[in-house]
Amino acid sequence: MDVSIITINYNNSKLTYDFLVSLNNFFPEKYTYEVVIIDNGSNKSSYYELKAIIKKLNFPVKLHRSNINLGFGGGNMLGNQFAQGNYLAFINNDIVFTEDCFTSLIEFMQSNENIGVTTPQQYNIEKKPTSGIDYFHGIRKELFGRSFYELFLEKDRVRRNHFPYKKETKADFIQGCFMFFEKNRFNEVGGFDTNLFLYFEEMDICYRLNNRGYESYLIPNSSFLHLHGGSTKVNFRIKQEFLISRLYIYRKNYSYLKYKVLQFIISVKLFFKSIFSPKNFKLFFIVIKGGHLKHSLKQEQQILNT
C-alpha cells in the first residue's frame, strides 16, 4: 500500500462523503491507497448515516468508531493503528480535492531524504489562495506579530503571506488540515501528542521533526479547497481550548523561563482586551492559572453507549 489517508468524522457525514468522492475522483492511478475513517464519538444517527453512505461507495473504506471523542491527535493516532501505507496523509474531512495532490508530494519526499512532512497549496471555498504555513510561536512573535518576526528570517525563506507560493516553500510548520508524512519518520517522533484535544498538534510535531533534522515543506504545484472550520464551530470553549493547547506546547517544548515570559505576554494582552471586551476576562484568568490540561474539553468527553 502506497498511501493511507486518515480522516476524522464527527457528526458530519455529508462533509465526509463529499471529501471521499473528491478524493476518489482525483487520486492518481499509479499509486495504491486506502482510506481510514475514525468516527470520533458521533451520535448514533450520524454514525449510522455515515455507515450507509460508505456502503454506496465503489471503493474500499475502513470505518472504525471510537465511543469517545478523542480529539484531533487522539483520533488520528487511532487511525494510524489501522494504516498499512508507506505514506500517511492526515486530512480533515472539510477538504475537497480538485486535482491530484499526491504525486508531487510523493515524488518530492522520494527525492529529499530530510523531509519530515509536506502539504499542497491551499485555497479557500471562494477559490482564493490562503497560507498553509506558519512560524514557531515564540517571544518575538507573541510580542510583535508575524511581520516583525519575518524581519529575522533568512533571505531565501518565503514569507507566509506571499501566496500563492511559486516554489517549494520551507516552513517552521504546516497547517494541520493536510499533513503528508513518510510513515517511518512519523513513527520515529511518536506521532501526534494525544494530550492535546484540539489545536497546535501541527506545530508540536513539526517542532519535534525539526529537532531530529527533518524539514517541513509546502509543495505548490498542486492544490486543494479547504472549507476552513467546516468541522469545528468557534465559541468560547473553543477559544479556551486554543489557549490551553498553546500554553501546553510552550511548557512542553521550551525552557521554563521562556514559557513564563510567554505566559506573561499572553496574559497582559488579554487583560487589555478585557477592558474593551469583558468576556475576555475569563480567558485572562485561564492563562494566569496556567491553562492546565485538566480544564481541557478532553476531560469532559463521555463514553457513548454503542
Image (cartoon, rainbow, N blue to C red):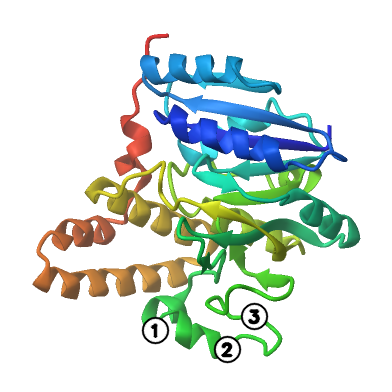
- Label 3 sits on what residue type? Val
Element under disc 2: loop
User: On residue 144, which mark appears?
Assistant: 1
Element under disc 3: loop
Provide residue 216's location: percent of width, then percent of height. Answer: 69, 63
Judged left or right of residue 145, residue 131 is right
User: On residue 152, which mark appears?
Assistant: 2
In the rendered image, the quadrant that contains the C terminus is: top left
Provide residue 248's location: percent of width, then percent of height. Answer: 43, 54
Along the viewing direction, whichever of 216 and 188 lies nearer the viewer: 216
* Residue pictured at 58% horizontal, 60% vertical: 122
* Residue pictured at 79% horizontal, 34% vertical: 85
Q: Tell me the crowding category of disc 2: few under 14, some 14 to 19, or many 20 or more residues within 10 angstroms, Cα based.
A: few
Q: Is residue 30 visible?
A: yes
- Label 2 sits on what residue type? Phe
Along the viewing direction, whichever of 144 and 134 lies nearer the viewer: 134
2 and 3 marks in contact (CB < 8 Å): no
| Label 1 to label 3: alpha-carbon separation | 19 Å
User: On residue 223, which mark appears?
Assistant: none
Counting residues from the N terminus, which is met first, the one under dot 2 or under dot 3?
2
| Label 2 to label 3: alpha-carbon separation | 12 Å
| Label 2 to label 1: alpha-carbon separation | 12 Å
Element under disc 1: helix
Q: Which residue is mark 3?
A: 158
Q: Is residue 22 above or below residue 141?
A: above
Looking at the rendered image, the disc whose residue lies closer to the viewer, 2 or 3, is: 3
